[in-house]
């Protein structure tokens, strides 16, 4: 056998998406990312993401599956934080579903329940961080406030402050380097900024009554009351989230990357949404699942550990005309196949040593398929079988999807998990499949535009596939 043959036909070589996609597909990828940037700019919280997905799916003729049984496109939303889009397939639903599951929550700061206080004549807001953040990322930058407040009478106030050009923002002031030597610089990075010090600047004008105590806080309470009808106790019944202010942007002279907040995992959520809307002629009943709470362990009634997937499956079976859907839920899920649509960490040129590069994901090499996550000796991993990996490989190759494999860092370097294991619980085959990010969990995560597009194409191909 010639060396040339071995090198070209036998040796495994990853392909750059930039070499694999023709001019037409590249153009589509850039257009796709224009809409994607708008999506993540508008959808900064799990509620806003649900609202956005709902809007777009209604425009694409999805109907409320709780109300309608006729038709072939349905949506299901629960608690405003978890949802599913469903499309009818040619085969019976009980023969197994094609599921792509992504999460819509992202690391952030939540306001504490009783957040307002005054100190050194400034009004401040206390926060509690959510998910795996590096606390120093959140200081010294413009932050916006999003959320809902349920008032005393049960009425709802929705807030979004800090995104419009003319809006004020909030910020966590860091300590000047001149004075941070002992209190920050000599400490370990993760200890340098304490969770309780992630407090936001919220105002500095005192109430005019000079005899009052906490005049600045009182003035802010007055403003909140005049503007939104709020009293301080209303903060006790609220979901208010603090996120980086501003829009997602192109990154680089060549505009080849997208930078923005919340791409873990809204990049996969957007690709999931577009893939189920655009997929042609699904053979199986297809389900795009959007779950909350992944960043804090998937617990709770809107997380992947809730029995939402069983609920949806019973609804699908009922729509498909099964008389006793409850009795065949487990059968259906056991025969289903799924992609756990989540991001992986791409190789960062400055920190290559945390990866074993023969098995790591790189920006620009297409959608990343991760056979297992976990930590140490594959602990807590839902590893996909060789057979399922083989099926995925064949599928993506057949449809010209540029794909690569990845692992979450080199052995014993750290690790992490996704929702894959919570769906694998039902016996379905599932594998992690999504975009490789740089700066994951930071306020400004970076992804390659072609990887985003290839992820969309991968999910679409999966939704169109049969087995
Ligand atoms: Mn994720
Ligand atoms: Mn994450």
Image (cartoon, rainbow, N blue to C red):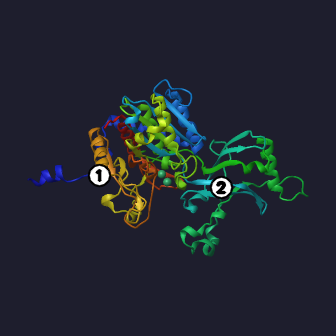
- On screen, 14 above or below 185? above
166 vs 135, left or right, is right
Which corner quadrant of the image does residue 351 belong to? bottom left
Label 1 element class = helix
Against 232, residue 156 (above or below) is above
What is the number of callouts on the image?
2
Residue 77 horizontal/vertical position (percent): 56, 37
- Of 102 and 195, nearer the camera is 102
On the question of residue 252 being in view, the answer is no
The answer to which image quadrant residue 139 occupies is bottom right
Label 2 sits on residue: 171
**Label annotation for residue 386:** 1
- Visible in this render: residue 193? yes
Q: Quadrant of the C terminus?
A: top left
Which residue appears at 55% of the width and 67% of the height? 190
As helix, strand or loop, the secondary structure at mark 2 comes to: loop
Nearer to the camera, 117 or 35? 117
Residue occupying the point 24% across, 52% down: 13
Q: Position of residue 93 (x, y in %)?
A: 41, 33
Pointer 2: residues within 10 angstroms few (<14), some, or many (20+)? Answer: many
Residue 388 x/y as whole percent:
31, 47
Residue depth check, mark 2 versus mark 1: number of the one nearer the observer: 1
């Amino acid at each position: 056998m010639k060396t040339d043959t071995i090198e070209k036909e036998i040796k495994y070589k990853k392909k750059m998406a930039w070499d694999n996609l023709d001019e037409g597909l590249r153009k589509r990828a850039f257009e796709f990312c224009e809409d994607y940037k708008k999506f993540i700019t508008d959808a900064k919280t799990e509620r806003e993401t649900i609202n956005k997905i709902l809007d777009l799916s209604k425009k694409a003729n999805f109907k409320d599956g709780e109300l309608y049984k006729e038709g072939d496109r349905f949506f299901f939303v629960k608690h405003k934080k978890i949802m599913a889009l469903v499309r009818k397939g040619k085969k019976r639903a009980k023969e197994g579903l094609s599921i792509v599951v992504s999460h819509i929550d992202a690391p952030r700061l939540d306001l504490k329940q009783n957040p307002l206080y005054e100190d050194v004549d400034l009004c401040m807001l206390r926060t509690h961080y959510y998910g795996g953040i590096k606390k120093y990322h959140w200081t010294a930058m413009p932050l916006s406030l999003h959320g809902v407040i349920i008032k005393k009478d049960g009425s709802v106030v929705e807030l979004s402050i800090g995104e419009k050009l003319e809006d004020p923002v909030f910020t966590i002031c860091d300590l000047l380097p001149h004075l941070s030597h002992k209190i920050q610089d000599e400490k370990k990075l993760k200890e340098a900024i304490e969770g309780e010090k992630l407090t936001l600047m919220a105002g500095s004008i005192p109430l005019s009554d000079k005899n009052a105590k906490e005049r600045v806080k009182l003035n802010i309470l007055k403003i909140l009351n005049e503007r939104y009808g709020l009293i301080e106790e209303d903060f006790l019944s609220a979901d208010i989230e603090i996120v980086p202010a501003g829009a997602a942007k192109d990154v680089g002279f060549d505009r080849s990357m997208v930078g923005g907040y919340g791409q873990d995992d809204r990049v996969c959520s957007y690709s999931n949404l577009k893939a189920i809307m655009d997929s042609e002629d699904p053979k199986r009943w297809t389900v795009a699942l959007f779950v909350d709470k992944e960043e804090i362990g998937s617990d709770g009634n809107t997380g992947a550990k809730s029995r939402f997937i069983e609920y949806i499956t019973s609804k699908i079976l009922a729509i498909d005309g099964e008389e006793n859907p409850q009795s065949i839920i487990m059968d259906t899920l056991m025969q289903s196949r799924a992609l756990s649509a989540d991001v992986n960490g791409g190789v960062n040129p400055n920190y290559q040593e945390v990866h074993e590069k023969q098995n790591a994901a790189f920006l620009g090499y297409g959608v990343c398929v991760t056979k297992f996550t976990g930590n140490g000796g594959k602990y807590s991993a839902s590893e996909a079988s060789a057979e399922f990996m083989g099926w995925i490989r064949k599928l993506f190759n057949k449809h010209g999807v540029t794909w690569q494999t990845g692992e979450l860092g080199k052995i014993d370097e750290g690790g992490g998990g996704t929702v894959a294991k919570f769906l694998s619980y039902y016996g379905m085959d599932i594998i992690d499949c999504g975009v490789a990010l740089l700066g994951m969990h930071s306020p400004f995560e970076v992804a390659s535009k072609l990887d985003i597009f290839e992820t969309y194409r991968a999910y679409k191909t999966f939704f169109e596939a049969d087995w």
